[in-house]
Amino acid sequence: MSYHDEKGGSESDAQVAYETPTTGWKGTYYKPLTQVVMLGFVCFMGPGLFNALNGLGGGGQLDATTSANSNVALYSTFAFVGFFAGSINNRLGSKLTLQLGTLGYCLYTGSYLALNIHPKSGAFVVAAGAVLGVCAGLLWAAQGSLMLAYPTEAQKGTYIAIFWAIFNLGGVVGSAVSFGSNFHNSAGTVGNSTYIAFIILTAIGIAIPMCMADPRRVIRSDGSRVIIPLHPTWKTQLYGLYLTLTTDPMILLLFPMFYCSNYFYTWQFNDFNGALFTLRGRSLNSFIYWTSQIFGAIGMSFILDNSRYRRRTRAFGGVAVLMVMIFVTHIWGYFYQIQYTRHTPGLQSIDILDKRYIGRVFLYIFFGFLDAMWQTTTYWLMGAISNDAGKLAIMVGFYKSLQSAGAAGVWRTDAVGIAYMNIFISTWVLLIAGLLFALPMIHLRVKDHTELADETLVRMDDKGNLRPVEEVQFEEGQVASSA
């Protein structure tokens, strides 16, 4: 059986029972696009606002050390939990996992309000970061499995772009709130009103997953149902981790790409935006950065979902575009980085009215493009490997775990005062290495269509045994015809 872009692509497709999607309000609610939009708003209120706060440099604080140490704690717990988060998601279900994942963002934002009121409460900020790491690991595993399982193969780049646009609106809105409330703030630290607004919005985000549909009831635009794995024992779920790596070892070649996918934030947020600009400049930069991500994701989706070219061709094309962007942004950034160090007098002095601001803000726009294009391509490559929601949850768990491990390491180097230039060069090198390692995986593993024979987790029974392809095909047909 092949999972094709359209119905009727092969003889084996005839064995699959397709459904006509329900019409009216109920049909609209159960559409994959509606659910991805709702998923986007979950992340708008949580990770999106977290990005707006982090994008200010130092979490909006004048001294970035506490924020850097909090990020070390966050990404350390995230790296550990993220590795197992896919199995947790497959055991608890995506809705409950998503719900649990939203809880940490409100606490994390509240810790900065506490720091403003009680300057000696830095330990609380670090502890809140550790809690958020656990919650974020759960949220992103659920998010990734749903976002990649809902669309057809021809729609994956588009759905990723739609999600990424809505998610980054959180950063846009949060940065706009910060910019407006701190326009005349000369203290260098975000005011209480900004943190309170963020707390209210993240609290709203906690309620959204309760309103989302059961993934089992969602029907794709071609009439096929979302592939949801069995929810067997914890032992079998952990075995699924091993099974994913052993049956699809090419995923290991994406690990360097995973590792550096948040690594660049440290230099961009703390060592460029946080180091060079006034609070007003940092706020506007953050607003522009997250806005540019929307266009970066949409632009990349046109490359990755261009039906005029084979999927393998699109994959290599996406990597080529990323390589060009890496060199453009980092050569540009290098000429700014050689002009200052941690000990250069007059840092945090560039304001939005300063003539030095224009060139640097345009570089920040291109960094926003690169981030969105990198993340979109990484998700798309995982989606090109599999359509199995259970396998995707585990792969996204690997992705977020390694991503967080890289982030924890580089945030720690920033906290202990490693030279800006060293962090910048390491970021540049790792990004190039990530793409080079991905090339063999694309050549060997990315096919024009995903075959059910390659999907291991959806064929695993509650004892960890792999069921024959024909049995799964028959079961899917029975479920579809009886629904």
Image (spheres, rainbow, N blue to C red):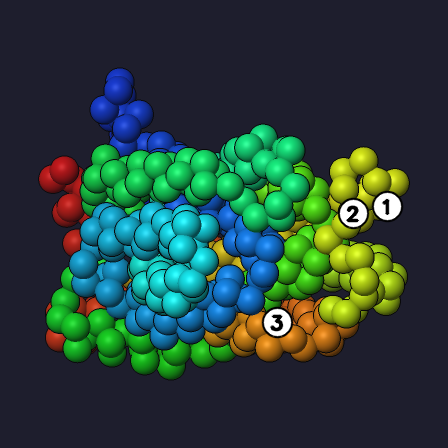
Task: Determine crowd level at label 3: few under 14, some 14-19, many 20+ residues with C-alpha closer than 10 A.
Answer: many
Q: Amino acid at mark 2?
A: Ile
Task: Determine crowd level at label 1: few under 14, some 14-19, many 20+ residues with C-alpha closer than 10 A.
Answer: few
Where is mark 2, residue-wise? 350
434 relative to 168 in the view: left or right: right
From the top left corner, tell me how far across and down residue 412 is, in percent. 55, 75
112 relative to 390 in the view: left or right: right
Q: Which one is nearer the viewer's eye here, 374 or 348? A: 348
Q: Amino acid at mark 1?
A: Arg
Q: CA distance from mark 2 to mark 3?
A: 21 Å
The answer to whether marks 2 and 1 mark residues whose Cβ atoms lie closer than 8 Å is yes
Where is mark 3, residue-wise? 414
Which residue is drawn at the image coordinates 86% and 67% (left, top)? 338
Q: Is residue 202 visible?
A: yes
Q: Which one is nearer the viewer's eye here, 69 or 43? A: 69
Which residue is drawn at the image coordinates 70% and 46% (left, top)? 278
Where is mark 1, residue-wise? 356
Nearer to us: label 2 or label 1: 2
The quadrant of the picture occupied by the C terminus is top left
Mark 1 lies on a secondary structure that is loop
From the top left corner, tell me how far across and down residue 66 is, in percent. 50, 65
Mark 3 lies on a secondary structure that is helix
Task: Give the mark nearest the N terminus, 2 or 1.
Answer: 2
Q: Which one is nearer the viewer's eye here, 459 or 170? A: 170
* Residue 477, label in figure: none
The answer to whether marks 1 and 3 mark residues whose Cβ atoms lie closer than 8 Å is no
Q: Amino acid at mark 3?
A: Asp
Residue ranking furthest to the top = 24
Q: Which one is nearer the viewer's eye here, 115 or 325? A: 115
Which residue is drawn at the image coordinates 72% and 49% (left, top)? 277
